[in-house]
Image (cartoon, helix red, strand yellow):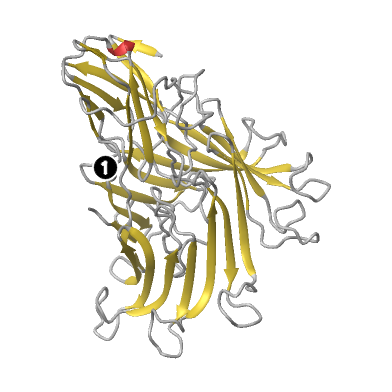
């Protein structure tokens, strides 16, 4: 541990993510469980992302084990995993949901604290289970301070949205003696989208989508591509183009998504004869990690929906390490000559390998291609490109760069690597994501997105811009191409 002027700087485990990681720079950064809609009117889920929220942590202290998430190195928990006794109050309390990503953790005792901050042991551990993927570090530094009866932990960077945390505190003493260990679990706020609007020009809407929820869980998405007879968008006579239904919820995460692109013979949307376009299934392991994703195209030979003979559009397999970090993802479209999925002869252009440093921060994502044996997952597989990540001192994502060519020396990861496509992030005064801008390999901007948050750190809006008639970003004719508005409590 580092100690600075009597304030103990400690390491906190968090679940977090950041940016697009080489994906569509316009995707919703804070909640990949909620699909966006692409410009062609299709919910943006056939190519699922691997990442989670936008806020990013930094390394933990090494050498011990977190009791709530084995294999994650932080300070040890030497006490029982039980609820905090009545003489101690904690904000947020045990079991709280919708907690602000900006709020400190405040423990209030019955008597003044007599021990020093440096004597305390504390951790804020990512509680695996239906959270977003940890990929920008397993811990974030923060400051533990004591004033009178109050012990406060303040993270250096915002927590991740839609994520469950487990807070532990021990080694605190008051005039009445040692304080029992404090253990609470809470979940930060989720950020569901209310609606999305896409524009053709600065004044002409192209389409809009409405997201439907049941007790906070996404259950449907309706896409409209014409304003109706009154010529006015976003009212009851808009012409619906398609819809999606989400079901099989596991702790708020859908396991089944069905897309329809026609109302059927009854000409009524939302009935049993809607025309099936595709459906998708997600599977989660015992830790709540999304390990499988299957997409099926249309109907099978029997013409009956969901009968089991529908053809695959693609499948995705994700592999995680013991710390809950994604280490490999593979998305083939066919099983290959051996007729077995997820083997080396599957039909796919490549697979992704994710590398991390000792602190659990993702350093690179490699795009791996077949070698001379024409098989995946063998020793002669070759790199086809990579993404490198750069973090700010407090662990938030500064930028990532997609690299497509090893340069004249034909060696990857050297100074002459070329075909570099950067995506750069900025943050507001509260350290929340403010802008995301992406550039081509000549450093010409290809687009940018702005993000708005309220005083509690909840995302309220997201706007992706078009370059306007002059084709150049950053000039006066830029206009909002796509806007997302979020649901607030």
The location of residue 6, given as percent across then percent down, is 28, 9
Residue shown at 52%/75% (left/top)? 277
Q: Seen in the image, is 313 located left or right of residue 175? A: right
Q: Seen in the image, is 217 located left or right of residue 374? A: left
Answer whether residue 477 is visible to the viewer in this image. Answer: no
The location of residue 119, given as percent across then percent down, is 33, 11
Q: Which residue is mark 1?
A: 457
Residue shown at 22%/53% (left/top)? 489
Q: Secondary structure at mark 1?
A: loop
Label 1 packing within 10 angstroms: few (<14), some (14-19), many (20+): many
Q: Seen in the image, is 207 located left or right of residue 287? A: left
Above-or-below relation of 188 to 13: below
The location of residue 468, given as percent across then percent down, is 36, 61
Above-or-below relation of 201 to 402: below
Residue furthest out toward the right = 373
Above-or-below relation of 199 to 29: below
Which quadrant does the N terminus fall into? top left
Q: Nearer the viewer, residue 189 or 203?
A: 189
Residue shown at 24%/23% (left/top)? 152
Q: Nearer the viewer, residue 396 or 255?
A: 255
Q: Seen in the image, is 231 located left or right of residue 442? A: left
Question: Residue 427 sits in which quadrant?
Answer: top left
The location of residue 423, given as percent across then percent down, is 46, 43
């Amino acid at each position: 541990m580092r100690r600075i002027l009597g304030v103990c700087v400690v390491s906190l485990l968090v679940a977090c993510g950041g940016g697009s990681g080489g994906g569509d720079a316009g995707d919703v950064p804070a909640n990949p469980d909620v699909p966006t809609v692409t410009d062609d009117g299709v919910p943006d889920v056939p190519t699922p992302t691997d990442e989670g929220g936008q806020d990013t942590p930094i390394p933990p202290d090494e050498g011990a084990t977190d009791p709530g998430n084995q294999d994650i190195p932080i300070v040890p928990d030497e006490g029982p995993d039980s609820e905090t006794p009545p003489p101690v109050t904690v904000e947020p309390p045990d079991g709280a949901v919708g907690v602000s990503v900006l709020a400190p953790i405040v423990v209030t005792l019955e008597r003044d604290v007599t021990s020093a901050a440096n004597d305390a042991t504390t951790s804020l551990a990512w509680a695996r289970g239906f959270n977003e993927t940890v990929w920008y570090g397993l811990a974030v530094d923060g400051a533990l301070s004591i004033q009178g009866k109050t012990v406060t932990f303040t993270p250096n960077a915002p927590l991740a949205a839609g994520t469950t945390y487990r807070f532990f505190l021990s080694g605190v003493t008051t005039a009445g003696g040692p304080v029992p260990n404090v253990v609470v679990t809470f979940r930060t706020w989720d950020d569901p989208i209310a609606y999305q609007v896409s524009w053709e020009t600065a004044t002409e809407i192209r389409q809009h989508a409405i997201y439907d929820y049941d007790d906070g869980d996404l259950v449907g998405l309706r896409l409209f591509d014409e304003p109706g007879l009154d010529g006015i968008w976003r009212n009851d006579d808009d012409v619906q183009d398609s819809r999606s239904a989400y079901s099989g919820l596991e702790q708020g995460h859908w396991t089944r998504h069905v897309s329809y692109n026609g109302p059927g013979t009854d000409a009524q949307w939302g009935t049993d004869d809607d025309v099936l376009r595709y459906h998708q299934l997600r599977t989660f392991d015992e830790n709540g990690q999304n390990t499988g994703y299957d997409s099926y195209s249309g109907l099978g030979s029997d013409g009956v929906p969901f009968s089991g003979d529908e053809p695959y559009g693609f499948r995705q397999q994700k592999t995680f390490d013991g710390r809950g970090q994604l280490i490999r993802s593979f998305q083939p479209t066919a099983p290959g000559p051996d007729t077995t999925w997820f083997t080396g002869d599957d039909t796919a252009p490549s697979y992704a390998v994710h590398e991390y440093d000792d602190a659990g921060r993702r350093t690179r994502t490699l795009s791996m291609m077949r070698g001379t044996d024409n098989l995946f997952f063998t020793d002669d597989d070759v790199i086809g490109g990579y993404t490198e990540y750069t973090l700010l001192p407090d662990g938030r994502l500064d930028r990532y760069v997609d690299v497509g060519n090893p340069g004249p020396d034909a060696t990857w990861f050297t100074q002459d690597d070329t075909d570099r496509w950067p995506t750069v992030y900025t943050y507001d005064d509260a350290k929340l994501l403010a802008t995301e801008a992406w550039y081509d390999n000549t450093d010409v901007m290809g687009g940018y997105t702005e993000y708005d948050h309220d005083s509690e750190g909840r995302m309220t809006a997201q706007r992706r811009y078009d370059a306007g008639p002059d084709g150049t970003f950053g000039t006066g004719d830029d206009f909002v191409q796509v806007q997302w508005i979020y649901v607030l409590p």
